[in-house]
Image (cartoon, rainbow, N blue to C red):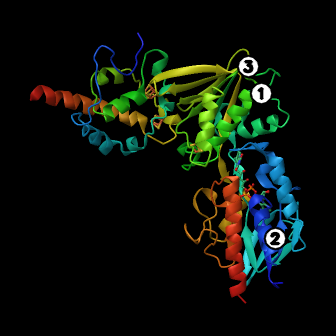
């Protein structure tokens, strides 16, 4: 199945009034260079994981930035943390650290959801 | 006639335009150029953006401007040392020939980015990866062909090669390559109308006058396709074509594409002469360019009295911007000559 970056079955808009945009600050604390990403997609293009799976690191990063967490943790599991994406990034973004820390922040967010 | 003399280092558009304006104001000057011919980088361009004017016409006009009794031209002479002593300036080449003057204009310009430094894009490794400068040279004979002599059916242009790239140490935008890609894509489509032309970009920077119009025209009339994504690598196929990988970021899908020719839009870097002579005089700015005294009215001056700047030795500029900057430098030089004894 094609992965279009959004789900066709569930009509939705990005609602900036209700989305959790603050979670991104927790990533920035750990990986300040994430701010510099200009979404050029070179990382996705070069990614070793997307040879075998449908995986788009740039889009995962953008979705997290926009407070869209659905299915993200599972998506990020496809990354092997090989760091190839870091080699091509024109903005010197620490891509690997983003993935690593996203995993932590996301599991933390889920934990809190269960608790409350 | 003023009894003061000016030395202009660099015989590109900036140096020539300043020489002409100074000569008209009765200032005597020497223009020194390292190459055998004047005109600098525009020697390599065939037609200019955004109006497709023949660069050769512009060159002829510039060369005619040098026919003035106040202008002495010395070619084949590369200045490698520049220093002030008292109220005078001295410039030397490696053969220790010395030139003396009351004021100096640095017009040593730029060099294009060496695409071999982006090894992953295959320039110098695969024959069918060329640069925008190679494209200009090929276009002079109206023949854009693959290394096998075939007419490309599919061509891709990649923006920002050597610019906006932390990996090569250049954070800045070179300002000329987006519009140059639009121009070259149109030129290619005119030569091979049934071909496909793709342009890969991160942002299309169409800020100059008539740039946006040309961009529209390339889409409407020539069907050039723009893809928002940076090509991460190029590889060669069995039949010597070029396979590129990018993400089509607007559809959020990784993509690959095989093209007959990949054109790298190389950026503007400070020339070796610009960096060397700026460094010697403590006026070295960012990325090896020369540093003006200030951004506003002091843009042609430097922290060294009697040392002036014009053109792309300061930063990336288009040709009209360079020429305007040269005329602006003239005013500052004349004011300086009149107020120093
Ligand atoms: C690929 C490309 C395409 C372009 N196409 C266009 C276009 O279509 N339209 C447009 O408006 N602009 C275009 N430009 C921009 C244009 O080329 C520049 O604005 C212009 O060349 C700048 O002139 P300059 O005199 O500052 O520098 P240069 O052209 O670099 O001239 C500098 C001169 O100084 C000489 N020199 C350097 N060091 C020394 C030394 N130590 N001693 C003696 N001499 C020295 C050099 O040999 C050279 O002749 C293009 C740029 C690029 C990169
Ligand atoms: S390569 Fe760098 S700048 Fe480009 S999308 Fe990936 S992280 Fe962002
Ligand atoms: S670190 Fe992950 S996202 Fe980056 S190239 Fe490797 S597998 Fe792909
Ligand atoms: S002008 Fe365009 S291609 Fe050139 S560096 Fe700037 S954004 Fe990149």
> Circle 1 — which element?
helix
Q: Toward which corner of the image does residue B322 lie, by quadrant?
A: bottom right
Mark nearer the N terminus (2 vs 1) = 2
Q: Chain of mark 3?
A: B
Q: Where is residue B233 drawn, in percent x and y?
A: 59, 28
Quadrant (top left/top right/bottom left/bottom right) for the C terminus of chain B: bottom right
Kindly identify which residue carries mark 2: B92
Q: Is residue A17 above or below residue B251?
A: below
Count of marks, rendered view: 3
Q: Residue at x 80, y 25 (%)?
A: B147
Which disc number belongs to residue B240? Answer: 3
Q: Is residue B50 above or below residue A8?
A: below
Mark nearer the N terminus (3 vs 2) = 2
Q: Chain of mark 1?
A: B
Mark nearer the N terminus (3 vs 1) = 1
Q: Toward which corner of the image does residue B133 lie, by quadrant?
A: top right
Query: Contact (CB < 8 A) between labels 3 and 2?
Result: no
Q: Residues within 10 Å of mark 1 (few under 14, many from 20)?
A: some
Kindly identify which residue carries mark 1: B191
Locate residue A80 relative to residue B231 in the image: left or right. left
Q: Where is residue B48 drawn, in percent x and y?
A: 74, 45
Of circles 2 and 1, the one toward us is 1
């Amino acid at each position: 199945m094609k992965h279009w970056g959004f789900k066709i079955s569930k009509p939705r808009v990005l609602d900036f009034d209700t989305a959790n945009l603050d979670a991104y600050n927790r990533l920035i604390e750990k990986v300040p260079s994430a701010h510099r990403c200009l979404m050029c997609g070179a990382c996705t293009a070069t990614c070793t994981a997307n040879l075998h799976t449908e995986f788009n690191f740039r889009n995962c990063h953008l979705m997290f930035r926009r407070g869209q967490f659905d299915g993200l943790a599972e998506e990020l599991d496809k990354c092997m943390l090989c760091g190839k994406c870091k080699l091509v990034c024109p903005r010197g973004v620490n891509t690997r650290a983003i993935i690593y820390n996203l995993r932590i922040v996301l599991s933390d967010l889920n934990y809190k959801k269960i608790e409350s | 006639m003023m009894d003061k003399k000016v030395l202009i280092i660099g015989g590109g558009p900036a140096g020539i335009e300043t020489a002409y304006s100074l000569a008209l104001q009765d200032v005597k000057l020497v223009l020194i150029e390292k190459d055998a011919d004047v005109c600098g980088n525009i020697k390599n361009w065939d037609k200019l953006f955004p109006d497709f004017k023949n660069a050769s016409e512009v060159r002829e006009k510039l060369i005619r401007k040098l026919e003035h009794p106040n202008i002495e031209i010395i070619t084949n002479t590369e200045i490698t040392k520049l220093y002030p002593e008292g109220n005078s300036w001295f410039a030397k080449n490696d053969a220790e020939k010395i030139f003396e003057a009351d004021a100096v204009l640095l017009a040593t310009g730029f060099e294009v980015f060496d695409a071999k430094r982006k090894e992953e894009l295959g320039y110098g490794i695969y024959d069918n990866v060329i640069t925008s400068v190679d494209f200009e040279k090929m276009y002079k004979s109206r023949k854009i062909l693959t290394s096998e002599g075939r007419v490309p059916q599919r061509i891709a242009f990649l923006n920002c090669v050597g610019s906006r790239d932390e990996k090569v140490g250049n954070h800045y935008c070179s300002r000329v390559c987006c519009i140059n890609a639009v121009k070259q894509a149109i030129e290619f489509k005119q030569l091979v109308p049934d071909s496909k032309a793709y342009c890969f970009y991160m942002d299309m920077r169409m800020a100059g006058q008539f740039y946006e119009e040309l961009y529209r025209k390339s889409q409407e009339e020539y069907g050039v396709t723009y893809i928002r994504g940076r090509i991460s690598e190029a590889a060669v196929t069995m039949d010597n074509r070029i396979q590129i990988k990018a993400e089509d970021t607007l559809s959020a899908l990784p993509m690959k594409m095989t093209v007959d020719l990949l054109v790298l839009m190389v950026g503007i870097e400070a020339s070796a002469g610009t960096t060397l002579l700026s460094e010697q005089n403590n006026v070295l700015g960012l990325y090896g360019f020369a540093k003006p005294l200030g951004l506003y009215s002091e843009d042609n001056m430097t922290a060294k009295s009697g040392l002036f700047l014009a053109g792309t030795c300061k930063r990336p500029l288009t040709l009209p911007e360079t020429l305007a900057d040269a005329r602006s430098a003239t005013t500052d030089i004349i004011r300086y000559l009149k107020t120093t004894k």
